[in-house]
């Protein structure tokens, strides 16, 4: 069972996923959140080997890198698969996905798959079979982990709602470029995607009506007498997560630097003895910081040199274990001959630093 926090401070509202040692993921309310948004766009130009640059309107341009390259001037349906960050426009896909609490509906892709977090005790097979019976020809879905605690009727109702939403989107004949749909409440979407069935949503008492409206149906709501941002030291946690240097409890530190090409992380012993213990602590801290800061793309981690292959494997496992429960897709390679671990992590939203900068303006 996990916990989330819904709170409001002078700088706005926030939804926070909580771990035993503090916030593990933070979503700040933003006026516009384009992740998952659907547009009817118009192709500006096609770059061989790169993709198509698509006009989304309102001086917005995205990059469609998948599928058959369209011709310049073509109007087509596209969806943001990665938000705009660092001055780059959003990454786009051509296969729409409409997320719900129990299913992700894919109206143009007939595959049926299931979350890796579903128990492999017959539940996964049963739910995939249910989805297969409910879906119409040409439709597909991803069964989410929350479906394990839901009744068949609730799943069927959600699928019908997602299908109706898609029919309205598909029927739109707006002149391209035009925005067709986006999440109406990013904080509600965050809680839908992160809070597990039976999870606890703690909310500021003045936010009680809002919390009841956006909480997942299977969540338990608890009211806080003290504002959550103060009770959980949220501002301090955010400020620490924006610092490039993170001290380690046993001595030494890690430094994190974001570049246009990726994220570079360096482990510094600072005179501390015991390279293995240092690297093991650093690996757990790195996993926590990467998720909290919302970092993604290519990540290079330079650990302190280890001579023994068995010790390097322990550090690799500790790093992988640190990302347990992380919803972002991730790929991790073993230590390179230079003592560097390379990994990629899916971008699920705007990095925390950019969110905070927007809220402070």
Image (cartoon, grey):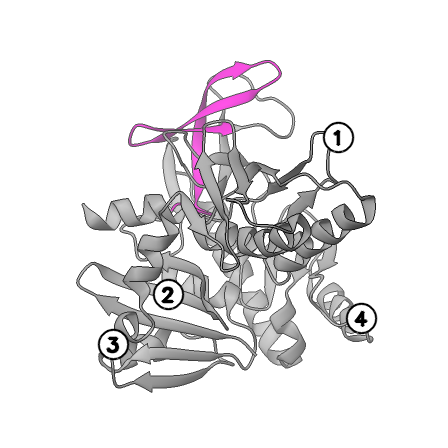
Q: Which residues are magenta?
A: 34-63
Q: Which residue is mark 2?
A: 15
| Comes first in the chain, label 2 or label 3 | 2
Q: Nearer the viewer, residue 204 or 181?
A: 204
Q: Look at discs 4 and 3 and give the one toward the viewer.
A: 3
Marks 1 and 2, how far apart at CA: 41 Å
Helix or strand or loop: what does disc 1 sit on? loop
Mark 3 or mark 1: whose residue is earlier in sequence:
3
x 21%, y 66%: residue: 9
- Sequence-wise, the earlier of marks 1 and 4 is 4
Q: Classify the position of the C terminus by image quarter.
A: top left
The CA distance from mark 3 to mark 1 is 50 Å
Label 1 and label 4: CA atoms lie apart by 37 Å
Residue 227, disc: 3
Residue 225, placed above or below residue 130 = below
- Judge depth for marks 3 and 1 and give the one in front: 1
Q: Secondary structure at mark 4?
A: loop
Q: Which mark is residue 120?
A: 4
Q: Nearer the observer, disc 1 or disc 4?
A: 1
Q: Nearer the viewer, mark 1 or mark 2?
A: 1
Q: Residues within 10 Å of mark 4 (few under 14, many from 20)?
A: few
Precedes in sequence: disc 2 or disc 4: 2
Decide: few, some or many residues near mark 1? Use Cα within 10 Å; few <14, some 14-19, many ≥20: few
Mark number displayed over residue 284: none
Label 1: which residue?
Answer: 337
The answer to whether residue 318 is above or below residue 228 is above
Question: In whole angstroms, how far apart are the C-alphas of marks 2 and 3?
Answer: 13 Å
> Mark 4 and 3 residues: CB-CB less than 8 Å, in contact?
no
Magenta stretch prevailing secondary structure? strand
Q: Earlier in the sequence, mark 4 or mark 3?
A: 4
Q: Nearer the viewer, residue 230 or 340?
A: 340
């Amino acid at each position: 069972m996990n916990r989330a926090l819904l709170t409001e401070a002078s700088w706005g509202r926030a939804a926070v996923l909580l771990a035993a040692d503090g916030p593990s993921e933070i979503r700040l309310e933003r006026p516009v959140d384009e992740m998952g948004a659907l547009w009817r766009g118009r192709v500006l130009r096609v770059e061989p080997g790169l993709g198509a640059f698509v006009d989304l309107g309102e001086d917005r341009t995205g990059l469609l890198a998948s599928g058959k390259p369209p011709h310049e001037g073509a109007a087509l349906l596209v969806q943001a698969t990665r938000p705009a960050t660092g001055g780059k426009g959003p990454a786009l896909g051509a296969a729409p996905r409409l997320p719900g609490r129990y299913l992700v509906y894919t109206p143009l892709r007939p595959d049926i798959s299931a979350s890796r977090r579903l128990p492999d005790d017959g539940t996964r097979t049963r739910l995939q079979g249910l989805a297969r019976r409910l879906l119409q020809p040409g439709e597909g879905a991803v069964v989410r982990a929350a479906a394990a605690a839901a009744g068949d009727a609730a799943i069927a109702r959600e699928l019908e709602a997602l299908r109706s939403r898609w029919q309205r989107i598909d029927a739109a004949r707006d002149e391209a470029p035009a925005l067709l749909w986006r999440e109406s409440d990013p904080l509600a979407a965050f809680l839908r995607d992160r809070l597990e069935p039976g999870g606890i949503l703690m909310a500021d008492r003045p936010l009680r009506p809002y919390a009841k409206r956006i909480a997942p149906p299977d969540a338990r709501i608890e009211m806080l007498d003290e504002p959550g941002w103060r009770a959980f030291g949220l501002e301090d946690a955010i400020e620490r997560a924006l610092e490039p240097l993170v001290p380690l409890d046993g001595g030494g530190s890690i430094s994190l630097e974001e570049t246009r090409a990726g994220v570079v992380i360096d482990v510094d012993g600072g005179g501390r003895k015991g390279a293995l213990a240092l690297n093991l602590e650093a690996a757990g801290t790195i996993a926590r910081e990467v998720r909290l800061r919302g970092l993604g793309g290519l990540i290079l981690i330079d650990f302190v040199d280890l001579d023994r292959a068995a010790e390097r494997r322990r550090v690799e496992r500790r790093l992988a274990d640190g990302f347990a429960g992380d919803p972002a897709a991730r790929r991790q390679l073993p230590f390179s001959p230079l003592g560097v671990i390379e990994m990629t992590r899916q971008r699920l939203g705007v990095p925390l630093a950019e969110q905070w900068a927007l809220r402070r303006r």
